[in-house]
Image (cartoon, grey):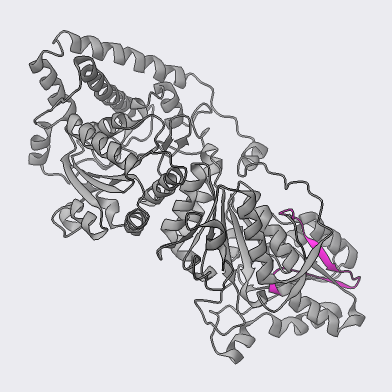
């Protein structure tokens, strides 16, 4: 192994040595504790430390790094106390996630480190968003993100690299190629000669380096970072290395040939660098045990301090309150001036006014710029706000949702338009496991709104017509809104954008140009979580939302003698339990109506709550009216049959006659 110190003085080289030594000794301590049964799991990075240490030292302290679970050297090189890390690993209250997540699954704005989640790949797109925020601010910073050779097969890898290349984002993508994805060797993972060859396919620069040579890692990344700060662009670096332990300690290493261990033992990053320093006279032989003993004593003390900390005492209310960032809808006087607007125009108006109000708001989606979006909601926005803030995206929902979260991490707000709500499945992991859980895990808000053009009625078939709110209402951490009228469409959208929590904003395509109403001209907010009585009644209640509200109104208009009360939920997570209880107490007969399929639709949750909490006030069973338990068909006659509206009169008749 050839080391080139370039302009690093002796003190600098000693610093590099100490930075390599500390994570190795922490790892050795963890293995001892594991054998003693004092800890339960450990993912070892022994043999790979030079990548984490060299790359971290090459960046400025205010530049974000997104590591994985074998990058202990990132955390120690950023000077996070060992006690704080140990508290995280042991699930103590003083850990970064307060016992809510494990190992390196956390982030910290103090140290500008954003940890991974267990799903390999999603952090790559977060790096894009962080870098985009820096680029928009002209901050001249780079972002560095790690992945393993196994995760290069993930779609998130492709999407993130493609976005970074198309948008010239200053992201350094590091592949730690240690030869195995758990036990699967590289010859069973990809067919290209080298992973760095993939860079050419994205039109970006690629480098392949010795990941065990700390100075080669440092100089390569430092020089690239200096260039990229002045000329933003992404770079892919493949670091060749080897892990000397199993995927995690329980998995063992029997799947690895002995000769590989022998070969890579000779390339140990710490041993080789230590020998180089001794040969150069930078390090004295007698210093080595002194430094090791000094670090070992520190580590032992830090570890025991954490073991002596009290265990967490669980409190239900504490955990429930930790799921969402506390937020109150801004107090405002509703404008006396209003204009009759279509539902679609009210949405556009809310977006436009939010863009003016929040200079840090970026909206992203397929064809939303010059084209104005599939439904023309953002038509004219590029001329008003510019292409930096109104961004056409590649067709990659997961990557764009991850980019939106990265923007939020780095001080921006983001609105993402799903061209159709059906396409959200391609970004499901980022929404469910990243956006929804991040605040609960380590206190980071995910200031992202996902716009969801949803619903049937246009003969668009199974992939452009779903109303899939129930996929998200069961996910703590997300808010879900579903306006039925133009004023609510504007008010809920502006409230969602103002809210620091992630919000799924459902907008029914069938309402875009079919309904109009008076909409306040100025900034307008509707509190998320508050239902609205849209028609008073005494004999029965219909509880509904979205297009269902208009089905209910149509039914009530045809049956004025039935005195039907209609409650528009407007918000589905959180939903207005008090308003539901009030209408049940008032009429004693309830029908829950929604466009989604009957089985596991959100109406089941409403019906269950009423049955549990309002049973003695009911004069009939809670009834549900929903769409058929099939995919939504294209043919008009079949679609009409599918829709809940086809059964509304029949179910209401049964309810009223009970």
Q: Residue furthest front?
A: 383
Residue span colored magenta = 526-547
> Hey, which quadrant is residue 352 in on the image?
bottom right
Front residue of 609/170: it is 170
In the shown orientation, is residue 335 left or right of residue 199?
Answer: right
> Hey, which quadrant is residue 625 in on the image?
bottom right
Front residue of 524/188: it is 524
In the shown orientation, is residue 372 left or right of residue 645?
Answer: left
Asked if residue 179 shows in the view, the reply is no
Residue under the image location 65 percent in, 39 percent down: 316
Q: Is residue 287 above or below residue 215?
A: above
Residue 291, percent from left and from top: 25, 12
Residue under the image location 53 percent in, 86 percent down: 634
Quadrant position of the C terminus in the picture: bottom right
Asked if residue 400 shows in the view, the reply is yes
Residue under the image location 20 percent in, 22 percent down: 8
Front residue of 391/448: it is 391
In the shown orientation, is residue 413 left or right of residue 25?
Answer: right
Residue 58, percent from left and from top: 28, 31
In the rendered image, residue 124 lying in the magenta stretch gets the answer: no
Residue 516, percent from left and from top: 74, 74
Residue 545, percent from left and from top: 71, 68
Q: In this view, does 312 lie above or below 150?
A: above
Q: In this view, does 82 lie above or below 359?
A: above
Quadrant position of the N terminus in the picture: top left
């Amino acid at each position: 192994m050839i080391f080139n110190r370039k302009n690093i003085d002796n003190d600098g080289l000693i610093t590099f040595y100490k930075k390599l030594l500390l994570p190795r000794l922490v790892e050795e301590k963890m293995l001892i504790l594991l054998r003693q049964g004092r800890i339960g799991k450990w993912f070892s990075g022994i043999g790979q430390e030079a990548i984490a240490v060299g790359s971290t030292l090459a960046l400025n302290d205010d530049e974000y790094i997104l590591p994985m679970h074998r990058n202990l050297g990132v955390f120690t090189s950023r000077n996070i106390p060992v006690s704080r890390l140990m508290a995280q690993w042991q699930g103590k209250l003083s850990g970064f996630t307060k016992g809510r997540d494990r190992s390196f699954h956390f982030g910290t704005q103090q140290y500008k480190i954003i940890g991974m989640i267990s799903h390999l790949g999603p952090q790559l797109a977060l790096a894009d968003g962080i870098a985009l925020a820096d680029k928009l601010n002209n901050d001249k910073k780079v972002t560095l993100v790690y992945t393993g050779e196994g995760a290069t097969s993930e779609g998130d890898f492709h999407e993130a690299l493609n976005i970074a290349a198309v948008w010239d984002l200053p992201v350094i993508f590091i592949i730690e190629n240690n030869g195995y994805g758990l036990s699967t060797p590289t010859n069973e993972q990809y067919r290209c000669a080298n992973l760095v060859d993939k860079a050419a396919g994205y039109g970006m620069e690629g480098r392949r380096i010795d990941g065990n040579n700390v100075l080669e890692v440092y100089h390569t990344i430092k020089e690239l970072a200096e260039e990229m700060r002045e000329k933003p662009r992404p770079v892919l670096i493949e670091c060749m290395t080897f892990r000397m332990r199993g995927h995690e300690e329980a998995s063992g290493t029997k799947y690895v040939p002995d000769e590989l261990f022998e070969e890579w033992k000779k390339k140990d990053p710490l041993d080789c660098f230590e020998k180089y320093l001794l040969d150069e006279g930078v390090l004295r032989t007698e210093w080595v045990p002194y430094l090791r003993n000094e670090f070992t004593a520190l580590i032992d003390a830090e570890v025991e301090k954490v073991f002596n900390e009290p265990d967490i005492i669980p409190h239900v209310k504490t955990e429930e309150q930790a799921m969402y960032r506390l937020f109150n809808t801004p107090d405002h006087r509703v404008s006396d001036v209003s204009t009759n607007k279509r539902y679609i125009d009210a949405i556009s108006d809310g977006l436009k006014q939010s863009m003016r109000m929040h200079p840090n708001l970026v909206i992203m989606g397929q064809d939303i710029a010059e084209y104005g979006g599939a439904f023309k909601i953002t038509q004219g926005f590029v001329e008003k706000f510019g292409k930096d803030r109104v961004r056409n995206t590649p067709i990659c929902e997961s990557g764009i949702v991850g980019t939106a979260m990265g923007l939020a991490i780095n001080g921006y707000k983001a609105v993402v338009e799903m061209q159709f709500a059906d396409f959200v499945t391609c970004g499901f992991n980022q929404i469910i496991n990243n956006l929804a859980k991040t605040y609960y895990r380590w206190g980071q808000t995910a200031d992202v709104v996902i716009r969801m053009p949803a619903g049937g009625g246009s003969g668009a078939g199974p992939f452009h017509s779903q109303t899939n709110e129930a996929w998200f209402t069961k996910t703590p951490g997300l808010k879900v809104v579903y306006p039925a009228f133009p004023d609510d469409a504007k008010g809920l959208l502006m409230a969602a954008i103002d809210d620091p929590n992630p919000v799924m904003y459902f907008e029914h395509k069938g309402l875009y140009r079919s309904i109009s109403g008076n909409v306040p001209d100025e900034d307008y907010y509707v509190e998320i979580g508050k239902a609205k009585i849209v028609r008073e009644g005494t004999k029965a209640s219909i509880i509904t939302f979205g297009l269902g509200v208009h089905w209910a109104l149509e039914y009530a208009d045809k049956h004025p003698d039935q005195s039907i009360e209609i409650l528009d939920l407007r918000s589905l997570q959180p939903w207005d339990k008090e308003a539901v209880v009030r209408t049940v107490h008032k009429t004693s007969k309830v029908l829950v109506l929604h466009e989604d399929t009957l089985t596991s639709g959100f109406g089941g949750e409403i019906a269950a709550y009423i049955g549990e909490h309002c049973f003695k006030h009911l004069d009939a069973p809670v009834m549900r009216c929903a769409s058929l338990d099939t995919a939504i068909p294209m043919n008009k006659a079949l679609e009409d049959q599918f829709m809940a509206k086809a059964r509304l009169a029949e179910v209401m008749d049964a309810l009223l006659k009970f």
